[in-house]
Image (cartoon, rainbow, N blue to C red):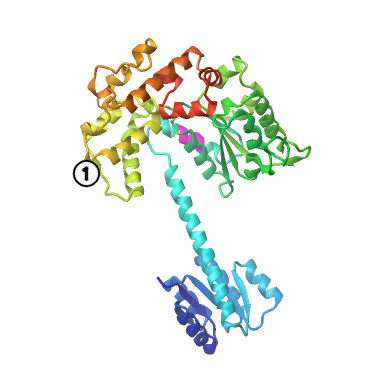
Amino acid sequence: MKSRVLVIDDEAAIRDSLRMTLEYEGYEFVGAATGQEGLALAERESPDLVLLDVKMPGMDGLEVLDRLRGMNDGVPVVVISGHGTISTAVEATKKGAFDFIEKPFASDRVLVSLRNALDQRQLRDENRSLKRAVEVRHQMIGDSPALRQVMAAVARAAPTNATVLIQGESGVGKELVARTIHRNSLRSRERFVQVNCAAIPEELIESELFGHEKGSFTGATEKQIGKFEQADRGTIFLDEVGDMSAKTQAKVLRVLQEGEVERLGSARTIKVDVRVIAATNKNLEEEIEKGHFREDLYFRLAVIPIHVPPLRERQGDIALLVRHYMESFSRENNTRPKRITQAALEALQRYRWKGNIRELRNTVERMIIMTAGDTIDLADLPGVVQSPASASGAGLAAGPLASKFAPADNDATKPGTLREFKENAERAFLVSKLRENGWNISKTAEVIGTPRSNLYKKLEQYQITQEADG
């Protein structure tokens, strides 16, 4: 599709010259002899770029530029003038012109400026589209009283700079709440930097958060900017904040108190302006009593506490979430949207989602992929969802370890493949070891001989939570 260029210049010879140049290069030309005519054409023709003369009878180019910016600030404007001075160029740039070209000009100079302006516009449009796609992906869906309460808290918290502590079970959407707060804050144009404190090994967490200088420790071959510096003027989201070590907690407290960080291996402090949002699925008050979490850091983080309810407390939102995910997955995979029967929808609403929204989302995606026809019916749902009683009696999280490896009597819950049997056995083993070690992740990881980050991945894979399996 040809890019449309509007040329506003009172000299017919200039317009004719530019018409030949632009049409030869494959652009669509639209011309205007006055500022008023140019504004009317800009509104009617929706040009991709405007070439605008400054010195014109009646309305001059700078006034036209003002009005063009008011009509559509997304259209790049290149100002041309035979009476060019530095002050005119500066004034045009201040008013939003992309470039300033003096007459007489070479065709190549115009074409280079035009290509640069159109490329920048395309990048800006792509960036906006990506941002809109991200916003849709991280949209909070639902109209239940429980979710409305969360959204009311978000609306009060967002415009402030106060730290927010988001608490709730795994999979309830704590990240969505954090992103919604950032999106509606005064920092929305700046970066949203996310850190999963549980997924980063203990020996690397400080370097990730605060950065390090080259040579500050073995393996530090390059200088690294920490997440707090990256989030300067924006928002940092500390997910699973309850899993930070005492040493890291002390450093995070200092950032909150002093507004400064110190890279590992450096004696220099760096000022940062960061809004902190933290999240955890742990009860931090209990962690304080056990001596695992600093009380002073808790009070710094929980200026505005927000509790995100589990999905079983927002059953009225399940139908909306299911339809949202069905549309979303169909769009992403470029497939025809499927419909879901009332019986299947009611079964999804009855089921107690231990993994909350994350589990529901995964289930919907699986149904979209695995259902052959255009309609998802009760028989297309996973067996445990079809028969909620079997979910609690799936047997893999209770009794002696040997009995956990045995399949349940219900055909829907029997492992049909070797892989399913192995996964069931692994899940049962992990739950058993977690219980033995009081659900202490670090201790359990040490006992079973696996990195803590790997254990967290397994917990997410099998949707193991203390609330559901404890």
Disc 1 marks which amino acid? Asp
Residue where numbered disc 1 is placed? 374
Viewport quadrant of the N terminus:
bottom left
- Residue 153 magenta-drawn? yes
Q: Nearer the viewer, residue 371 or 308?
A: 371
* Residue 279, position as x, y percentages in the image: 54, 30
For residue 95, what is the image quadrant?
bottom right
Q: In this view, does 96 lie above or below 443?
A: below
* Residue 329, position as x, y percentages in the image: 34, 44
Q: Nearer the viewer, residue 315 or 421?
A: 421
At horizontal 73% and vertical 37% (from top left) the residue drawn is: 216
Viewport quadrant of the C terminus:
top left
Q: Give the residue at the far bottom of this rendering.
A: 13
Q: Give the residue at the far right of this rendering.
A: 267
Residues rendered magenta in the picture:
150-154
At horizontal 64% and vertical 26% (from top left) the residue drawn is: 297
- Residue 81 magenta-drawn? no
Residue 394 visible from this viewpoint: yes
Compared across the picture, whether 66 is left or right of 457 comes to right
